[in-house]
Image (cartoon, grey):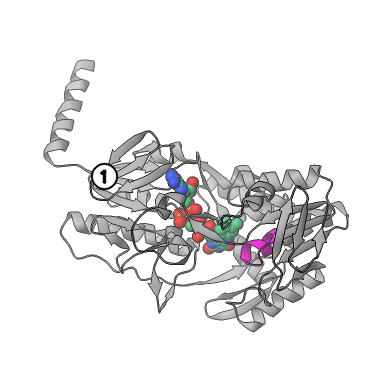
């Protein structure tokens, strides 16, 4: 029996070789990469898939701020990538990509080179420290479940009077309101600051939305330092260019994002934040696609913002276009549907722009969590998140 099994295997192997089994490499096991992997298998594309990620887990980023106020436990936001890869019959490498050799169709890892026929770059984004060594050393950041847990534990264990969030974008606001929520539960009064370089929060949003956010932060006594620039920072202190200083301060950096480091050295054309410019089919070259936060897709004259809805459908579209290329069929244009966005704030008063309408209050908070449950990976995680939300209340 055993012998026969081996014989069958080698026949399959030879058949595969004769049918020219293609190799698809996916860099990044976030939303776009995992959705591409799943779609490839749904389409029954005859290929080997290699998934590469430097992390062990797929992580659900939109709920990371909720780890800080203990609304959600980090275990519900992570899914083991080796198991996911196995489910979709993919080979998984838990390694960091350091370069891509486009001329020879090779992905370069620290100690290995892997050849591909088709490549999907789905390595997302990460914090941009703009080369600020002090920030890298002394500030915390939020781009993984373990970052969220570190902020939570540092707040619990440390003896800080001031909490300084550098960057007044979506993430900075979510971090600040979750720190507020933590201290509301523990009934302690602390100073929470958001440091904003310009004179307005979320300047790309409508006046109504950014005013609502500013008023809500004001109600929570979160202080926004407008037109503020950090001069230097150290262990527990931060000083500003106008002479203002804060001591016994926990600093969290949320001042910007960029694509993965290896993308910096690629010669391909890039947009701000290092995102790879893609054409209407999401290609950066004939056999190479970029999707999700790594990609810059121009829609109606503007780059699509970094969001889950676009990452998922870009991953799916890239998979379908690989199949089209293999079958010499015309490629499909990526046609995004923008459902809108929400700025979640942890006191339950959120706001957003959904289906073309501005919405305010508890409804956008509920929608945000509904979207998070719906988009999270696997029924077990969905039930886990829902039960955490019921236990810890959305409001
Ligand atoms: C705090 C926070 C809150 C957010 N809230 C929302 C929200 O409410 N709604 C919304 O729509 N979007 C939100 N986003 C954005 C959303 O999470 C991203 O748009 C989405 O996750 C992008 O998916 P992706 O697959 O492109 O990248 P990611 O999900 O970032 O995955 C990229 C993967 O690539 C891996 N990788 C990176 N570099 C390498 C390398 N060199 N080698 C190997 N692997 C590598 C990473 O480890 C990671 O697993 C939020 C993001 C953050 C950080």
Magenta-colored span = 166-175
- Quick one: 333 or 100, which is closer to the camera? 100
Secondary structure state at the residue bearing disc 1 = loop
Question: Is most of the magenta stretch helix, strand or loop?
Answer: helix
- Quick one: 174 or 185, which is closer to the camera? 174
Q: Quadrant of the C terminus?
A: bottom right
Residue 387 position, x and y percent, is 66, 49
- Label 1: which residue? 116
Residue 197 position, x and y percent, is 66, 70
Q: In the picture, residue 301 is in which quadrant?
A: bottom left
Residue 29 visible within the image = no
Q: Is residue 150 above or below residue 390?
A: above
Residue 14 visible within the image = yes
Q: Is residue 302 above or below residue 92?
A: below
Q: In the picture, residue 190 is in which quadrant?
A: bottom right
Picture residue at 17% right of the left edge, 37% below the top: 16
Say left or right for 12 vs 211. left
Residue 27 lies in magenta, yes or no? no
Residue 171 lies in magenta, yes or no? yes
Query: How many neighbours does mark 1 have within 10 angstroms: few (below 14), some (14-19), or many (20 or more)?
Result: many
């Amino acid at each position: 029996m055993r012998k026969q099994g081996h014989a069958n295997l080698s026949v399959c192997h030879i058949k595969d070789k004769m049918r020219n089994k293609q190799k698809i490499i996916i860099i990044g096991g976030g939303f776009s990469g995992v959705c591409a992997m799943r779609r490839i298998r749904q389409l029954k594309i005859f290929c080997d898939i290699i998934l590469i990620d430097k992390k062990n887990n797929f992580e659900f980023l939109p709920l990371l701020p909720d780890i800080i106020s203990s609304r959600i436990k980090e275990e519900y936001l992570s899914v083991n990538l080796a198991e996911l890869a196995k489910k979709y019959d993919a080979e998984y490498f838990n390694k960091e990509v350091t370069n891509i050799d486009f001329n020879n169709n090779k992905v370069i890892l620290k100690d290995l080179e892997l050849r591909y026929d088709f490549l999907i770059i789905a390595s997302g984004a990460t914090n941009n420290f703009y080369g600020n060594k002090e920030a890298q050393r002394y500030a915390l950041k939020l781009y993984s479940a373990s970052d969220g847990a570190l902020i939570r534990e540092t707040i619990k264990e440390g003896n800080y009077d001031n909490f300084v969030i550098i960057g007044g974008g979506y993430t900075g606001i979510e971090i600040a309101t979750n720190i507020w929520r933590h201290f509301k539960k523990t009934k302690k009064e602390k100073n929470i600051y958001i440091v904003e370089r310009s004179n307005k929060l979320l300047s790309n949003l409508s006046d109504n939305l950014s005013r609502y956010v500013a008023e809500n932060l004001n109600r929570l006594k979160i202080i926004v330092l407008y037109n503020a620039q950090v001069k230097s920072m150290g262990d527990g202190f931060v000083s500003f260019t106008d002479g203002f200083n804060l001591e016994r301060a926990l600093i969290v950096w949320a001042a910007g994002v960029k694509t993965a480091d290896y993308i910096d050295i690629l010669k391909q054309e890039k947009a701000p934040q290092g995102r790879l410019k893609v054409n209407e089919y999401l290609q950066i070259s004939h056999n190479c696609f970029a999707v999700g936060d790594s990609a810059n897709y121009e829609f109606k004259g503007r780059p699509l913002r970094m969001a889950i809805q676009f990452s998922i459908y870009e991953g799916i579209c890239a998979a379908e276009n690989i199949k089209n290329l293999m079958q010499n069929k015309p490629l499909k244009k990526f046609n995004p549907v923008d459902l809108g966005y929400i700025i979640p704030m942890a006191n339950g008063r959120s706001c957003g722009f959904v289906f073309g309408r501005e919405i305010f209050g508890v409804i956008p908070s509920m929608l945000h969590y509904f979207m998070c449950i719906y988009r999270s990976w696997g029924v077990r995680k969905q039930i886990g998140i829902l039960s955490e939300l019921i236990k810890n209340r959305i409001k």
